[in-house]
Amino acid sequence: MNRQLRLAKRPVGEPTPDDFEITEEDTPAPGDDEVLVKVLQISLDPAMRGWMSDAPSYLPPVGLGDVMRAGTSGVVVESNSDRFGAGDHVVGTLGVQEQAVVVDKALTKVDTDMAPLATFLGGLGMPGLTGYFGLTEVGDLREGDTVVISGAAGAVGSVGGQVAKAKGAGLVVGIAGGPEKCQWLVDDLGFDAAIDYKSEKVGRRLHELCPDGINVYFDNVGGDILDAALANLAWGARVVICGAISQYNAEGGMQGPRNYMMLLVRRARMQGFLVFDYVKQYGDALREMAQWRAEGKLKTREEIVAGSIEDFQPTLMKLFRGENTGKLVLEIAAT
């Protein structure tokens, strides 16, 4: 039997346990070019909140009654594919369930001798690639740039700051919540400075730390912090819109930027993106990032919560309450 977590109703504000239901069904045998995967780990991502809403987005919403969409890691149990054998570790979007039968093209094999399995959901997975392409492609990162990253202690921001340093940025400043996270950014990851938005005036600190303005601002949070960054842009700045986690559970609608006219004043641009825009470049990016990791230039951190699919909702809420550092993963079976 396969146990699954399904979306029972669309959340209003923060998702609650009542928005989901647990179901069971028989696990089918894999057909031609299909494999049966035992799900070991589930990726927790801010984008999940948007997937639950019936609103236009880059992906269709999760349907009511459907298995909740999620990136996962797992191990192949049975294979009818030439590409995979039993025992192979894989990643793919298999959803919040204990097992899945999928076509082989939906999976990527990973080498757990290179890094722990959870790292392929984080620093060497979609979040890490998001940080990489957001800085190098959308942000048009140049040597000597002053770079500021919000949500810097999360899965995307923590990698993005290290990418900026590895690519020759002159100053990298992270914005995070709490002294422990800020200390981690500077002492462990090599950020030049960090701003604690919970205890410091973000706009004032940005002006002090970046007296010549911000060349690249990588935004993961939106809201007031985005406005503070816009007020401190340099001439020709690039503002990268990756996410707006501060706004995802807002019941009165999302707050747009009030200081957007600084884009005109500073001749700057603001651009949104998705990591899927650069799928043809994944291989090259991952090779470079893996090399940095081997050289100690890229450090990853996975916060693994051991539990079951019943723990999905409370674990997800850790993201929106700023309770995690690095990549948040729910482990539902031993690796």
Image (cartoon, rainbow, N blue to C red):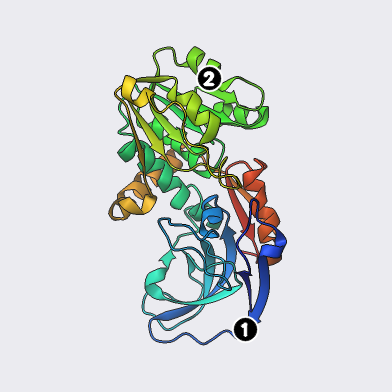
Secondary structure beneath dot 1 equals: strand
**In front of the other: 241 or 215:** 241
Three-letter residue code for mark 2: Gly
- At 55% from the left and 60% from the top, the residue drawn is 52
Looking at the image, is 107 positioned above or below residue 330? below
Q: Which residue is mark 1?
A: 25
Residue 308: x and y in percent read 69, 65
Looking at the image, is 53 positioned above or below residue 179? below
**In front of the other: 286 or 315:** 315
Dot 1: within a 10 Å radius of its alpha carbon, few (fewer than 14), some, or many (20 or more) residues? few
- At 61% from the left and 47% from the top, the residue drawn is 251
Name the side, left or right, on which 22 lies relative to 231.
right
Three-letter residue code for mark 1: Glu
Camera-near label (1 vs 2) is: 2
- At 45% from the left and 16% from the top, the residue drawn is 210
Residue 242: x and y in percent read 44, 42
Q: Residue furthest front?
A: 252
* Figure disc tally: 2
Looking at the image, is 37 positioned above or below residue 306? below
Residue 177: x and y in percent read 63, 32
| Labels 1 and 2: the sequence-earlier one | 1
Q: Which residue is mark 2?
A: 203
Dot 2: within a 10 Å radius of its alpha carbon, few (fewer than 14), some, or many (20 or more) residues? some
Asked if one can make out residue 296 in the rendered structure from this viewpoint, the answer is yes
**In front of the other: 153 or 199:** 199
- At 57% from the left and 84% from the top, the residue drawn is 27
Residue 334: x and y in percent read 65, 65
Asked if one can make out residue 124 in the rendered structure from this viewpoint, the answer is no
Q: Which quadrant, please, contains the N terminus?
A: bottom right
